[in-house]
Each structure stands twice: as C-alpha cells, then as structure tokens.
Amino acid sequence: MVNYFIPTQGPESWKAFLADPIKQWKKGYSAYELAHCWEVANNLPCCVDKVFKHSEFTLFHNVEVLFGFPEYKVPLPGGNSRSQNDLYVLAKADNELLPIMVEGKVSEPFGETVEIWLSKNPSEGKRKRLEFLLNLLGLHEDCVHNIRYQLLHRAASAVLEARNLNTHHSLMLVHSFSETGKWYEDYANFVRLFHLSPKRDGIVGPVELNEVNLYFGWVTGEKTETHDFPEENYKINNQKEKSAQRIELWSNKRLQFEPKGWMKQMKEDLRTNLKGITPIENGVLYCKFCTKEDHAVFDVENVLLYNVGSGSFSGISNNQVFMERTFEPSPFVDRSINLKHYHLYNYTTKDNISFYWKKDGTIFEWSGLQVSSLKYKPHEYWYNMKKLQTKKKYNSLIKDTNFGIRINIGIPVAKSVNLTAICKPLLDGVISAFHNYSGSDLDEMAMRLASILSIGKTEVANLLRDDQMAILGLKEVVRRFQRGVQWNPSDDSCYQIQLTTYKCNGPNWIIDGEVYLLRK
C-alpha cells in the first residue's frame, strides 16, 4: 500500500501518531520534547546543527532538512509489526539525499534486550526477523544477546530507507534530553559492535552495509521550559475573512533567531497559526513589522521570516511575498498592556494590499541574471551579480539612506519555489554585491571565497574591491565565520522588499530586479 502524508499543524499534531497519546504525550517525555524541539527549528535544532557542523565528516556540515515524518513506520520481515521511528528526517547533504532516523530519549531505555525479546521459545516470525536484521547489519547473533533490540531495528530502518532512495549515506541519530546521558552506554555498546568508537555529542562511522554508509550519532538537547509564561509578554490574533487571512503578533521583545523561555513558546504559537492559513489561487503574502524602538537596527526579513522559519510559510509563499518595516502606531491589542513590537502576516490578493512605502526613483536595476538552480547560500548570488556587465559606474548613496528592493524571479516550467526559504541567502548575496570591500582581511576572504566558488583567488579579490555597482558604498561586507564566511550587507536599511515570480521558458531560473528610493 502506498503511503501518503499530510503536513503537521505544529508540535501538537505529533500526539495523534503515538501508540498511547495519553501516557506518552507529556512535558519531559521524549515524544513531546522531540516534537517541540524539531518542529520549531528553522532547519535543524541548534544542538543537532552544532554537532553536525563540528563533525569531522564534511557530509554533515551543510545539511538541509527537506521533510520530516513523525512516528515513521518501516516494515520488516517476520510479522505485521513495523519499526516505528520517532522521527524520520529526509535531508539533503552535499547534493545527495540523506535519510536520518531520529530516536528521542529522556529517561526511558531502548526497550528490552535481544535475549529477552527472543525468549526461550521464539516464534518463527521472531527468528525470521532477527535473521534479517543481523544479515542487513552484518552482525552475529551471539554478539547481540545483551544489545537492546530497539537499536537493531532503528539502525536497520536507516539502511533500508537509504536503499529505497538509492542513496549512499544514512544516519541513525539518538536525540537525548537527559542531562546525565541516561542509557548512553547501551547505545555505545551497540555502536562498538561495528568496531567504532562512540562519542557523546558526536557522529561516528561510517560502516558500509549493503552499499550504504551508515553513521551513528548522539546529540544532547535541552528540555522545553516547564513553567508557565505571563500572558502579557505576547498576544496573537488570527482573523479569517473572505478576502484575507491575517495573523497578528504583538510582543514585548523582538523575535530572536534562537529564542528561549516565553519567546520560544511565542514562536511556536506563531508558527502554528501560520501553518493554519489555507492557500488560495493567486494568493500573495504581505508581511509588516513596526516597533516603538524606532532607532533599533535589524534586518526586517530576519524578524518577519527567517527567525520564524520558512516551513511556516510553505504553500503560501510560492507566488509573491512583500515585506515592510514601517514607522506607524501598531493597532491596539490591549490598552492595559505595553507591547512594543508588531507583526502582521496578511495572506490575500495583491489588490487588497495597502503599502506603507512608495517608490521614489530607481537607483539601480539589472536583468538577465540566470542560474541553473536557486541556492541556499549567498555567495552564488553575490558572484553572479558582480559578474553582470554594467554600462556605467553608479554613485554611492548617502550613508543610512533607506531603500527598497524588488526581485523578480523567472521560474522554469514544472518548477516551484518557497520564496521565504531562499529569501535570506538571495537578499544577502544580491545586496552584498552593492558594496565594495573595505576590511583588512581581503586576502583571507578572497582565499575562502575562491575555495567555496571554485574560482581563482585573484578574481575574487578584484570582485570584492570592484566599485562599479557599489551604490551602498564601502563596507566589511564579508567576514570570517568558522571555516567559511559570513555576509554582512547593509540590508538593515532596506525597508521594503518585493519578491515576485513569473513562468519562463528554458531550463534556467532568471533573476531580475531593481533598488529604489522610498517615500511615505
């Protein structure tokens, strides 16, 4: 039978997939903790992302989550019961699919040992299943009697899913929420069967099994907060009308990338409401942020989209997305509560949008930029923008001049895009191209970018210094970050962003656009 899956509507959706929701769905239990940790993550949970990026294996340095399947069942021979994995994450790493089977743990063990599971008189089905697992994992029965049976079929699930996808790598990952690392030794004993040295908060491997490179990982994460949060920290209003679906958020603090405490709960509630929006034909997403802290410096796309997580906007951001930072009083939610920050997410048709900012003259425009695929890193966009042929040298704007940007994306036939997923790298890369580099680390930056882009160091250095289109002036636009780079353009002065799309012929994506001045 074919499996079909539907999107979750927040962490609470995971509860329905449990064998016993009443007993298993509680704060401090693995199912609850895993759901709240993974569902609210922008891509990977911070603790997982940290372990991946510090791994000795480059395969895990740039992992992109494609889909997640809670309580994912993998059929095994020898009976009707299937291996029910807490979470199956289908990811992409090094342009290859990477299945990750995640087992959540707090204080519960990995089930009974193989010896106890078999019992003295095992059924034919159990014998058949164990034989299958041992053959698949390359193990001998006399070595596994004291091994937890759950670990065998979780590892097998990772291998089987990789084979189904015809991919070469897979990962069995234990996500522990136990501060003492409870049951780690059971996991470690299992990993040692493959002649590997297990690590806490680390990845080891691989072991080659049936042409699949299987890795093992153990990650320690924090439990969700267990105390109640004062209601006056934030308010959310969800309003559905015939012509528009509006989500409004008022908060005491500006939403951060890795929120803690009540802000983490606020983010989760906001995501749940956004996921409840129903897509409509020709629907567009208008997002607005205003704050009483008029002089605060931040990137509006981060506050409105990136810090929320692109998965929250899936299905409602494939046509047109508009963002504005405005300077106006926010609607009152409760006059007795002083909430400083306001988000508006209005999903409607374009003729129902009233923009705060008006265009006041084009500063720079470009056309004809083509890429084979949309990237999730800024450097590709920066490089392609810098390679554009401009007919004249453009003057720099006066420092701290506010501007808007419109980017129009031509989508090849049979392709689609979640604009909120590519928004940050696209904007960072494009806007960075409007600077010329002014830092003292030019040689190192050129070397690192040359390695990333697979081009010559001299060419990169020349492009960094090039001022032909440097309308935003001199800046240390790129910096060292771990073993790579981090982009730092002046997009905090960009108060209006328009991302639009159209269908185009040919295999390439086309990126046209303009930068313009603003007036109220």
Image (cartoon, rainbow, N blue to C red):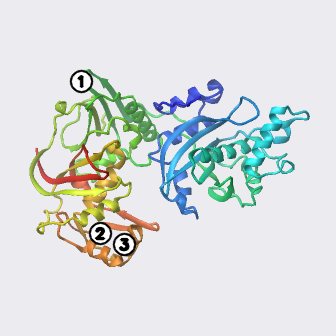
Q: Residue furthest left?
A: 361
> Few, some or many C-alpha atoms within 10 Å of disc 2 (few <14, some 14-19, many ≥20)?
some
Q: Amino acid at mark 2?
A: Glu
Residue at 60 percent across and 51 percent down: it is 170
Q: Position of residue 172 (x, y in %)?
A: 64, 49
Q: Are marks 1 and 2 in contact (CB under 8 Å)?
A: no
Labels 2 and 3: the sequence-earlier one: 3
Residue at 20 percent across and 34 percent down: it is 350
Residue under label 1, please give it. Answer: 243
- As displayed, is residue 5 above or below residue 515? above
Q: Nearer the viewer, mark 3 or mark 1?
A: 3
Left or right? Give the position of 501 relative to 260: left
Q: Amino acid at mark 1?
A: Ser
Q: Are marks 3 and 1 in contact (CB under 8 Å)?
A: no
Left or right? Give the position of 518 relative to 194: left
Q: Position of residue 455 (x, y in %)?
A: 36, 72
Q: Quadrant of residue 319?
A: top left
Labels 3 and 1: the sequence-earlier one: 1
Secondary structure state at the residue bearing disc 2: loop
Residue under label 2, please give it. Answer: 476
Q: Position of residue 9 (x, y in %)?
A: 45, 30
Q: Quadrant of residue 474?
A: bottom left
Labels 1 and 2: the sequence-earlier one: 1
Say which quadrant the N terminus sits in: top right
180 vs 384, nearest the viewer:
384
Residue under label 3, please give it. Answer: 455
Q: Amino acid at mark 3?
A: Ile
191 vs 482, nearest the viewer:
191
Q: Is residue 13 visible?
A: yes
- As displayed, is residue 35 above or below residue 293? above
